[in-house]
Amino acid sequence: MSRWRIQKKLFLCLIILVSYSDSFYYAPQCRSPSWSISATSLGSANDLESMTVKELRSLLQSVPMERGMLSKLKRKQDMIDFLKQQETMEQPPQKEQLKDSRKTQSEYPQPKSKSIDNNDTQAPTRIGNMPPLAKNGFPENSDKGRSHPKKSNHWRESLYKQYPPLRDLDGDPAPGLAEDDIRQMYHPIMKNNGVNVTNSDMEIITIGTASCIPGTTRGVSCTALRLQMNDISNKEELGTWLFDAGECTQLQAQRTTRVRLGKISKIFVTHNHGDHTFGLPGILCLMGQNWDHDNDPPIDIYGPAGLRMWLRVAIRYSVSRIIPPYRVHELHDVPYSPSWRYDPRFQRYRYLRSDRQEWRKHFIDEEKDSWTSQSRLMPLEISRRFGELQGGRDIYPDYNHPLSTNGAPVWEVLNGEIKVYAAPMSHTIPCLGFVVKEKDRKGRLRNDVVEPIVRRNIDALREAGFRNPMKAMAVIKNLEEGASFTFPDGTVVHQHEAVEPPRPGRKVVICGDTADASALTNLGKGADVLVHEATNTYIEFFDVKKTAASIQKETTSHGHSTPQMAAQFAKAISAKKLVLNHFSPRYKGDAQFDSISIMTMVERLAQKAAGMAPDEVVAAWDFMLLPIHSRDSKDPK
């Protein structure tokens, strides 16, 4: 046989093999992880009664009916009655039928889908979607769900106990966003002595909690810190501060009343990846529509070097003239973590070792074509027509700062009544973590000591010039340390006797993407809240072909953390509460039972690693509001 004939036959065989394998994989029967819905027997009333509304609705889609009938079947009992009336009941396919149907599908290949629907539980698990959970709260193919029914049922009942509305939803997502989300009411971290508490003059709002790309149940990175303290004299330091502004931030901000665009005063950018910056021009344009350019102060934006020119180019290229006045303050010389080294073979920085401790001073970016290197050479100047004002600062690191950890640099970003520090994170590009520190508050007046003396001297105080003698208590409260007040009857009250010790200010640590946040250790000691990423993790029965060690290694090599890694840092800085965010797209953020079950597993992993209680750890969802109570409040934490 001639050579060209052999090649022709081999080529034809290859085409047949490829078309068969593709059609086999994308056959609808093969895409379904189980026959729990489509193969449920309709002949048994007990089977129908045990099914959820979601399963019944999926089953009805395969039953011939008049147009519009499916939309009329709202209640579970209506669906069951309709199915019982059908003369022809579907039966679950046998192995032989399944085999024949696969052959049929291979003869008629199905088109490949170009998109992935985050809500499609039937999608192949190889793309990263979580498999659906069975009724016991474990994966449908889980050995644990079959061999330990008591333990599985205990898990489901524990979630029902924590979130009572889930029991009545029958598998459907719970309605409501923000304050109407059932997790906002029932999650343990929201409780204060058993009572739900949401009022505080300092609050965290998680506008976006996903990594990489926005999805149907999560937006990408954006965290708001709302400051409303009355004892801060410089009101320009108050308002709402945003940390990162990923894609669709301008849409997310309009879905909640908790973030008022006119109150945003500062924006902090941890690093330049798109899921942290793509929304910055958009949110500025949205804010500019109602901005009073004559009276409202400018927006202050803080981030790594190169941010000023990038934003200037984005606004100028899109001819966006509705931008509010803004200033960009750049943090220069942000180094890579000692664990990362430039690899000339790949022409990029790579994670090499986890035990390197020496930070490189006077950092020089070895990627000559990087934006950080090239942006400083661009001749584009400031233009007031496009919103940018003079006054942007260039902030440089201090390697000898008293709060430095293991020689890591520290940036003093703000040094007013509210202080802001920054330190480098361990990520694939230069990245920062921020620490917000409230000033210490004055101690409270000891009324039981002062009030009896005031009342005893009311008439004499009035004669001495006090229109309202009780105002003398305010004078005593504001005494300088070491000072005293003498009453008309000769009683001397010293400041340390009448006033309690100063109340420590609150501290919030917000990390950027990181595989190691240890550079923030000294800065973050005793934090009231730590916001730390937990991009990926190993969950038994979901990650069947992987191990906890392999997932942690893979996550670390991409500059990210697992819940256990976040928990270890929370333990190292003695954080009072841990907020996990920046989740992989495979972790849904809605209030469906499956989603809450998975995120509760994530929380349990962090709780165990940090030794923290359930009311101290939360896997954040979009629009979660977490009040940060002052340390002298009734909040026991």
Image: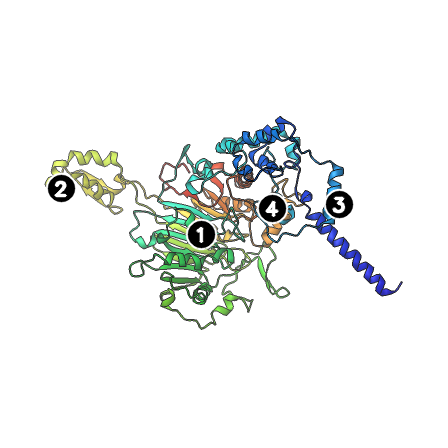
Which residue ends up furthest to the front in the rendered image?
A: 66
| Picture quarter with the C terminus | top left
Residue at image mark 2: 467
Mark closer to the chain start, 2 or 4? 4
- Which residue is found at the position 59% from the left and 50% from the top? 116
| Picture quarter with the N terminus | bottom right
Residue at image mark 1: 251
Mark closer to the chain start, 1 or 2? 1
Q: Amino acid at mark 4?
A: Asn
Q: Nearer the viewer, residue 109 or 120?
A: 109
Residue 103 badge:
3
Tell whether label 2 touches label 3 (CB within 8 Å).
no
Q: Amino acid at mark 2?
A: Arg
- Is 15 displayed left or right of 438 in the figure? right
Separation (CA) of disc 1 from disc 3: 46 Å
Mark closer to the chain start, 1 or 3? 3
Separation (CA) of disc 2 from disc 4: 71 Å
Residue at image mark 4: 129
Separation (CA) of disc 3 from disc 4: 27 Å
Q: How many C-alpha atoms fall within 10 Å of the one at disc 3: few (<14), some, or many (≥20)?
A: some
Indicate which label's residue lies in the foreground, 1 or 2.
Answer: 1
Element assignment for label 2:
loop
Horizontal and vertical percent position of residue 497: 26, 39
Q: Amino acid at mark 1?
A: Leu
Separation (CA) of disc 3 from disc 2: 97 Å
Separation (CA) of disc 1 from disc 4: 25 Å
Q: Nearer the viewer, residue 511 or 143?
A: 143
Mark closer to the chain start, 1 or 4? 4
Indicate which label's residue lies in the foreground, 1 or 3.
Answer: 3
Whether residue 206 is visible here, answered yes or no, is yes
